Image (cartoon, rainbow, N blue to C red):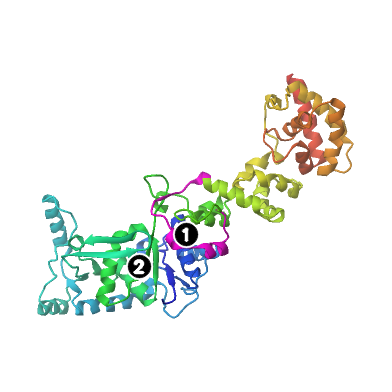
């Protein structure tokens, strides 16, 4: 078998949709797992939908995720150019070849005639939009005369009218269609531009693509692709159609509908490694129970035959859980780098960032959760003294006042204001009062944060925010309790 060559051929129409990134990943893995080549091709023939900067987004997204390409617009290669709009002369040439072989024909039907045809089809209850092949068998002399007169035309593929056409897909098996259902599709439009279906086939052949990985929305078009390959006498590639990524049981994810793009997820604080790992499993199942894979591990275990037929539901709850696992697997040093901009977006005072992050890491699902969790450090929120009640530690507001009045002088005397130093100052009071540590320290956390859930226990919060702020907030809490009890 020849060397495996796959391609990712996105349109630069905006942000990278997660379904597009999954397709790129599957195409990349199919190539790399077989020691083959991965090609990037930009399909920009739909000029009206092109978004400025979208090509850079494609480049950056693939590079961020390690999906490097062997050939493409920026790195070149033997089969360029790799931007479809730069290949325009090629497609007309190949369409004319098909005309000369009797596999395609010039169609001179005007827009007015087609509109009338569609109206008649609608009135008769027929399928609207199906071309009636009016120009299919025009005499050669008439075609040449009308071309010489400069009449507007399209080039249509001459489809068989009897029998069936089939293709074999690695995931869906043999797919067969009745030829009478196939329309004589347009290959070259009246403005000289190729249709997507035609340009795709020509480019894939000329670039030596052996495996076509794409979404299953192209299943219905694949018989037409096969007929083009056969008309030219070209080898048909291996088809790998992937199930759609759905937002629920009925609706596909779509950037047109405002669904989250890869860039949106990164901006929300999801790690790129977690996103890529999660996308791997959206429509593909490994053998065994392991779910967490690096890109190198994905390459080693990848088998495209394990792609599922069933649609994959994009579950944001599961992605959050995935992300939490990836955050927990980072080193403490790496997590500080990740968390710093989120902490500093709300906290402007000096703190022990490293200790704060030690406590944040096991409690963090996505990085954008961090600002709300640490905002209390900058400004103490208003809170009710009812927060001091805790069933687990059997504490109420009066117990909290006792605990804080005991803790205040102990912490005032601390000279080593560190995590251990603060804890060592509090520990003797547990034995002195004959209580559990939580009974004593739970009120400290409330007094310092005004929140029930804090990044770490009371002594850790104190060590994070510093001695001066700790004592200031404890005195304010004691005064609040005395005033309201």
449 and 171: which is toward the camera: 171
Tell me, yes or no, if residue 195 can be seen here. no
Quarter location, residue 410: top right
At 37% across and 68% down in the image, what residue appears? 238
Q: Position of residue 151 (x, y in %)?
A: 16, 73
Query: Crowding near pointer 1: few (<14 within 10 Å), some, many (20+)?
Result: many
* Residue carrying label 1: 21
Per the rendering, the mark at residue 77 is: none
Q: Which is closer to the viewer, label 1 or label 2? A: 1
Check disc 1 and report its element: helix, strand or loop: helix
At 28% across and 69% down in the image, what residue appears? 226
In the picture, measured across the screen, residue 120 lies left or right of residue 192, that is left
221 in the magenta segment: no
Quarter location, residue 186: bottom left
In the picture, measured across the screen, residue 428 lies left or right of residue 456, that is right
Question: Which image quarter holds the C terminus?
Answer: top right
297 in the magenta segment: yes
* Residue carrying label 2: 45
Residue sitting farthest toward the front: 288
Question: Which image quarter holds the N terminus?
Answer: bottom left
341 w.r.t. 409: above or below: below
190 w.r.t. 258: above or below: below
Mark pair 1, 2: CA separation: 20 Å
101 w.r.t. 485: above or below: below
At 48% across and 64% down in the image, what residue appears? 58
Instruction: Give the residues in magenta.
Output: 291-317
Q: Position of residue 189 (x, y in %)?
A: 25, 69
Check disc 2 and report its element: helix, strand or loop: loop
């Amino acid at each position: 078998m020849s060397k495996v060559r796959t391609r990712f051929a996105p349109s630069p129409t905006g942000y990278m949709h997660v379904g597009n990134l999954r397709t790129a990943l599957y195409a990349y893995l199919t190539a790399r797992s077989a020691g083959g080549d991965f090609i990037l091709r930009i399909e920009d023939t739909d000029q009206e939908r092109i978004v400025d900067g979208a090509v850079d987004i494609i480049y950056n997204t693939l590079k961020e995720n390690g999906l490097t390409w062997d050939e493409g617009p920026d790195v070149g290669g033997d089969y360029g150019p790799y931007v479809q709009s730069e290949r325009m002369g090629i497609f007309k040439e190949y369409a004319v070849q098909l005309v000369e072989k009797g596999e395609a024909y010039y169609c001179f039907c005007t827009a007015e005639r087609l509109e009338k045809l569609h109206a008649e089809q609608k009135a008769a209850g027929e399928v609207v939009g199906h071309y009636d092949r009016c120009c299919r068998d025009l005499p050669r002399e008439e075609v040449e005369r009308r071309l010489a007169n400069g009449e507007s035309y399209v080039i249509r593929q001459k489809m068989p009218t009897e029998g069936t056409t089939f293709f074999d897909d690695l995931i869906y098996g043999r797919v067969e269609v009745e030829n009478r259902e196939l329309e004589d599709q347009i290959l070259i439009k009246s403005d000289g531009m190729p249709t997507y279906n035609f340009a795709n086939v020509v480019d894939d052949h000329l670039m030596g693509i052996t495996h076509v990985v794409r979404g299953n929305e192209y299943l219905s078009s694949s018989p037409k692709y096969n007929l083009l390959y056969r008309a030219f006498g070209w080898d048909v590639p291996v088809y790998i159609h992937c199930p759609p990524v759905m937002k629920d049981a009925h609706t596909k994810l779509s950037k047109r509908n405002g669904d989250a793009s890869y860039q949106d997820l990164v901006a929300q604080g999801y790690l790129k490694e977690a996103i890529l790992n999660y996308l791997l499993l959206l429509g593909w199942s490994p053998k065994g129970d392991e779910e967490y894979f690096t890109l190198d591990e994905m390459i080693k275990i990848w088998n495209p035959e394990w792609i599922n037929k069933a649609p994959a539901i994009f579950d944001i709850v599961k992605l959050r859980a995935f992300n939490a696992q990836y955050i927990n697997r980072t080193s403490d040093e790496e997590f500080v780098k990740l968390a710093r901009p989120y902490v500093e977006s709300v906290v402007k005072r000096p703190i022990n960032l490293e200790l704060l992050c030690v406590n944040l890491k096991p409690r963090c699902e996505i990085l954008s959760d961090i600002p709300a969790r640490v905002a209390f450090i900058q400004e103490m929120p208003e809170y009710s003294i009812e927060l001091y009640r805790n069933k687990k530690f059997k504490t109420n507001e009066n117990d909290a006042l006792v605990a804080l009045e005991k803790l205040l002088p102990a912490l005032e005397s601390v000279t080593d204001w560190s995590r251990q130093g603060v804890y060592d100052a509090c520990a003797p009071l547990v034995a002195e009062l004959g209580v559990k540590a939580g009974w004593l320290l739970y009120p400290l956390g409330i007094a310092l944060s005004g929140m029930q859930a804090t990044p770490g226990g009371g002594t850790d919060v104190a060590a994070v925010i510093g001695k001066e702020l700790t004592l200031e907030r404890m005195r304010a809490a004691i005064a609040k309790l005395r005033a309201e009890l």
